[in-house]
Image (cartoon, rainbow, N blue to C red):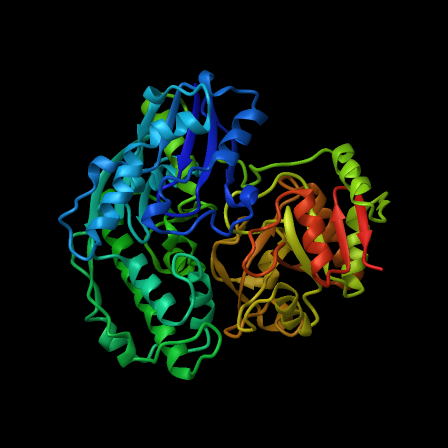
Amino acid sequence: MRILGINAVFHDPAAALIVDGEIVSAAEEERFSRRKHGKRPVPFSAWELPEQSAAWCLAQAGIRPDQLDAVGYSYDPGLVDHSLGGLDQQSEQTRTDYARRAPAFLRAALPGLDPAIVRFVRHHVAHAASTALAAPLGDSGVLVADGRGESTSYLAGEYRDGKFVELASQRLPHSLGLMYEDLTQHLGFERSSDEYKVMALASYGKPRFLDQFRELLYTTGDGGFRTEPVPWESFAPAGHGGEFGSEHADLTATVQRRLEDVLLELITWLHRQTGQRNLTLAGGIALNCVANTRLHDEGPFDNVWVQPAAGDAGTALGAALQLAAEFGEPVAPMRGADLGREWSDSELESILRAAKVRYTRSDDVAADVAQALADDGIVAWFQGRAEFGPRALGHRSLLAHPGRAANLERLNDVKGREQFRPVAPMVLADRAPEVFSRGPLPSPYMLFVHDVAADWRDRIPAVTHVDGTARVQTVDPADNALLARMLSEFDRRTGLPVVVNTSLNTAGRPMVDSPRDALECFGSAPIDLLAMGPFLVWRR
């Protein structure tokens, strides 16, 4: 069967394609439109579809819209409860009306598509399918937590033999994600966008308001929780997105710690209900790497797997996977996050020629990049298929030497980011245990934090956060031979099996996706070398 998945309602519109149970492609609309998160997360934007990413998914597989067997849309307007408190009823009605019209909108966006094949998939079930059905684990308990779906903010259950069994959910207005978004907004950041900045800031503070927050956020013993209204100003004044005092850091650390505690209680309850060995996670909360590590280290499950595109973009994949399972298709696990666009060497060279830039073709791009990094150059690395999800995983990455402490500030300047933001290490998978501890290894998707070993902290200061941790990506030669060889070459030159890895973009812009994007980023930022396929473009 040919099944297209669509996410469009809240933010991060995306499309994914499943053919005969295999994940063929997945991409976020922002990578095509170059609008961060694809669109504004407001009700009147619910009509906007991932037209370009959906068209690409079909075209690269040679499938016409009229050849699709089903389309999964990751929101069911029939489940919206307009009587729930805390919601703007007019806005809800606008969002619901647009969602109901999605089949007709899709027919207009993809000429030839039959609106009758469009099926609404409950938002949190799409999240659940995106992780449990994509994980290489088999049966699992599954927990989804985010801002909100149709009328809920959380879902817990299990998948057995590809079938989902719901065990608990949480009705709005109670929401872990919305509370975290409220904090993000209070600090002066953009909600539904900058929550990862809040997680980074938490490392600078102490959770000194925990006693108060135990009364504002707590579990109910039946798999649910409550989030009471928070008087944010009583803890810290409103921030301005860049200037923070100790009270802001302490408030952030408190909310982060309390979130982790509540999640631990929820998965402990889930384990008692299911007896499963494996836990799979999705929803925006599952992008909280610090919380994920505590769930792995202190929780009752043997294995924890997180969908790399755990945010709303991943529901496009989940909607398609869920329909495949419901149709009885055997679903294959996700082999990697590199599900987006790629260009052949000849296409890359044609683009370089058209851009009239000086370039050379490398005989050994891995060795040449390793030498540039050893010489303390900043390298834009553009190789293979683009990543699906918010993490740069060695396909659209910005690389640097981890042994130079100044490279943290240098990279944040290059990207135009706040200086409290950390950058991450990529490391050879077989060397990771000697450099990092705590948290699961291997960790190929950069979704957990690990402690940097004491005797390595001075050796790789650029990737060691203020609390002694790092958000690690392990690289296995079997999964990415070129990237692994570059790391080996860098290790041979420096004695460090680690390289700084951050996303190839500048602040406020989506991650680089196309060769044109890469050239524009290289031309506008002080990057020393662009390695695009086998081609090298040096800054003069």
Residue 297 is drawn in which quadrant?
A: bottom left
Image coords of residue 275 (percent x, y): 27, 44
- Quadrant containing the C terminus is bottom right
Q: Residue at x 35, y 50 (%)?
A: 301
- Left or right: 126, with 494 as reference point: left
- Left or right: 532, with 199 as reference point: right
Q: Is residue 46 visible?
A: yes
- Left or right: 511, with 157 as reference point: right
- Is the residue 440 above or below the residue 457 in the image? above
Residue furthest left in the image: 83
Residue furthest top in the image: 67
Residue 347 is drawn in which quadrant?
A: top right
- Is the residue 13 above or below the residue 118 in the image? below
Image coords of residue 92 (percent x, y): 24, 47
- Quadrant containing the N terminus is top left
Residue furthest bottom in the image: 246
Q: Nearer the viewer, residue 312 or 114?
A: 114
Image coords of residue 73 (percent x, y): 35, 33
Q: Residue at x 38, y 19 (%)?
A: 114
Q: Is residue 275 visible?
A: no
Q: Residue at x 47, y 57 (%)?
A: 448
Q: Nearer the viewer, residue 266 or 80?
A: 80
Q: Nearer the viewer, residue 395 or 262?
A: 395
- Is the residue 395 above or below the residue 370 in the image? above
Q: Nearer the viewer, residue 97 or 485?
A: 97
Q: Residue at x 70, y 69 (%)?
A: 403
Image coords of residue 388 (percent x, y): 52, 42
Residue 377 is drawn in which quadrant?
A: bottom right
- Is the residue 121 above or below the residue 84 in the image? above
Total labels: the figure holds 0
